[in-house]
Structures are given as structure tokens and as C-alpha cells.
Amino acid sequence: MRYWFGLGRVLTLAALVVGAIGCEPTSGSNSRLEDEPNFVRGKSRLARRDIDGAVLSFRKALANNPANAAAHFELGLIFYEPSNEKNNYVSAGYHFQRHLELQQDSRHAGNIRGFIKACKKEIAKDIAMAPIPPSEINAIHTLRTQLAKANSENSHLKSQVEAMRGRLQQAGSDVPEVAVAVGGPPPSVNPRNPRTMPRPNYGGRSSQARTHTLQPGENLYSLSRRYGVAFTTLKAANPRLMRNSRDLKPGVTVYIPAKRTP
């Protein structure tokens, strides 16, 4: 079957070549294109079956005049012929298409459109039958393995999230509700006057707390010895003065915590 198909294409090409040689009158425009020296040389070489020389001459004709529809037609026939070592369906389709674009009233238009369709089919066959390089096959297998691993990890993460969500819901239902009192500060505290804030209780029985106005030459260490309060306790009771030593100057009020008693 393939033999008869190839034979039919060869006979069709032969008929087109005969028509191109001169069985039908050519227009003045085509005649001028075919009189171009490189085109004439290409036809002569083609008649002698010098395919390489003919291709070179027709390409030179196109270099001189890219709109030479006749040269495109001849190159299309050369590249389309299946028995030709120059057979290239991509190039054949290109030159046939350019011929139709440049010469829309071509007397070979019907056959050329059929050739273009045949070129597309042959190109599709070559693409479908093209072997895949081993490197690309390995890359495909690697991607498939990575995809399967990612899907497995995704499923595992989903199950972990669902389990964690269930535990959180169960834990939330087991936690008793805590009543939070919303309102202002206790009546004994005036938020606008920090001095009314209760002082820390350092435990044990103690005497009454007091304040001391710092005099020249005094410091926290001397006050701790004077009032019998540990130096660390005095520092803890006056954090503002400890944060900024420049505030520790005469006239500053120092809080003296209650002295512990056994």
C-alpha cells in the first residue's frame, strides 16, 4: 500500500514538472522570474539530476529576489520528492506555502495545497515516532517518583492535621469555663495616682513602711543600713530609681519597705 502511495506521489510530481517546463503558457511575470540566470542554471542542473547544484542555484535566485515564486515552487518539489536524498517535508511545506502566498493564482495551487497537507501528515508521523532520549526518560521517571512521594507526604500531613484538630476540639470541650470579672480597678486603687498602688508585701511580721526624702550625701546603701533593710530589698522596692541612676539625687522620695521581724 505504501508503495502505491509513493508511486502516486511520484507520478503527480512528474506531471507538475512537465507543466512547469512549458506545457502551459506562463504569464509575463512568471516568465521574467524564470529568466533569472540562477533560476535558469538551477533548471539545467535539475535536468542533469544535479540536485545539490539545483538547490544551490534556486537559493541564489531567492537571495537575489525573495519574492521569486517560481524558485520557491522548484525547491518545494525537490524537498517533497520521497526518493530524493534532499527529502525534507518541513522545507517542502515552507516553500510550497511561500509560492501560494506570492502567486495566489498559481495554476498548481490545487496540487500544492494537497502537497502541504501531505507534508503536515509526514511531519506529524516523524514527531510521533521520534525516539525519546534516555536522559529525558530518566527525568520523567524521577519526576514521577518525586510526585508520588509528595502526594504521600501530603496525605500523611493531612492525617496529622486532622488528628491534631480532633485532639484540640476534645481538649477544648474538657476545659472548664473561667469567669473573668470585667470592670475597673479595685476601689482602693486610683489609676490616676500610682502612689495609691499597694506596695509589695515581703512576708513575715513587719513594722510600718515609710518614705524618706534623700539628702545630700545619702544613697540607697546608706539608707539600707540606717533603716535596717537589706540593700537588695530596698532596690526592689524602688525600681524606678534603679532604672535611671540620674533620678537618685537629693529631694527624691525613696520608699522604705517594712522591716521584717522574726
Image (spheres, rainbow, N blue to C red):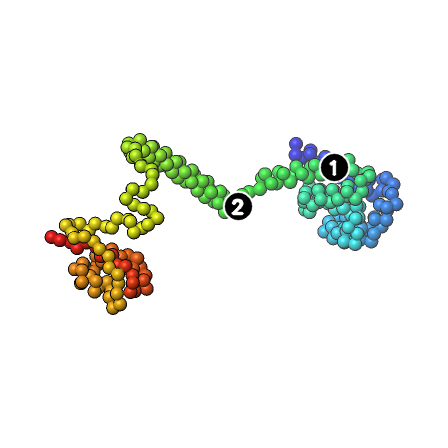
From the image, tell me which residue sits under label 1.
113
Name the residue furthest left: 262
Marks 1 and 2, how far apart at CA: 34 Å
Question: Is 202 or 6 nearer to us in this picture?
Answer: 202
Q: Residue at x 64, y 40 (%)?
A: 123
| Label 2, residues with CA under 10 Å away: few <14, some 14-19, many ≥20 | few
Kindly identify the amino acid type of the residue bearing the numbered disc 1: Arg
Percent x, y of residue 254: 26, 59
Q: Residue at x 32, y 46 (%)?
A: 190
Question: Is 25 or 52 nearer to us in this picture?
Answer: 25
Kindly identify the amino acid type of the residue bearing the numbered disc 2: Pro
Percent x, y of residue 114: 73, 36
What kind of element bears circle 1?
Answer: helix
Question: Is 60 or 9 nearer to us in this picture?
Answer: 60
Q: Residue at x 45, y 40 (%)?
A: 147
Quarter holding residue 260: bottom left
- Judge from the rendering whether residue 3 lies leftward or rightward of residue 168; answer left or right: right
Residue 74 appears anywhere in the view: no
Residue 262 appears anywhere in the view: yes
Q: What label sits on residue 43 in the rendered view?
A: none
From the image, tell me which residue sits under label 2.
133
| Label 1, residues with CA under 10 Å away: few <14, some 14-19, many ≥20 | some
- Where 111 falls versus 218 (above or below)? above
Quarter holding residue 180: top left
Name the residue furthest bottom: 217
- Dot 1 or dot 2: first in sequence order is 1
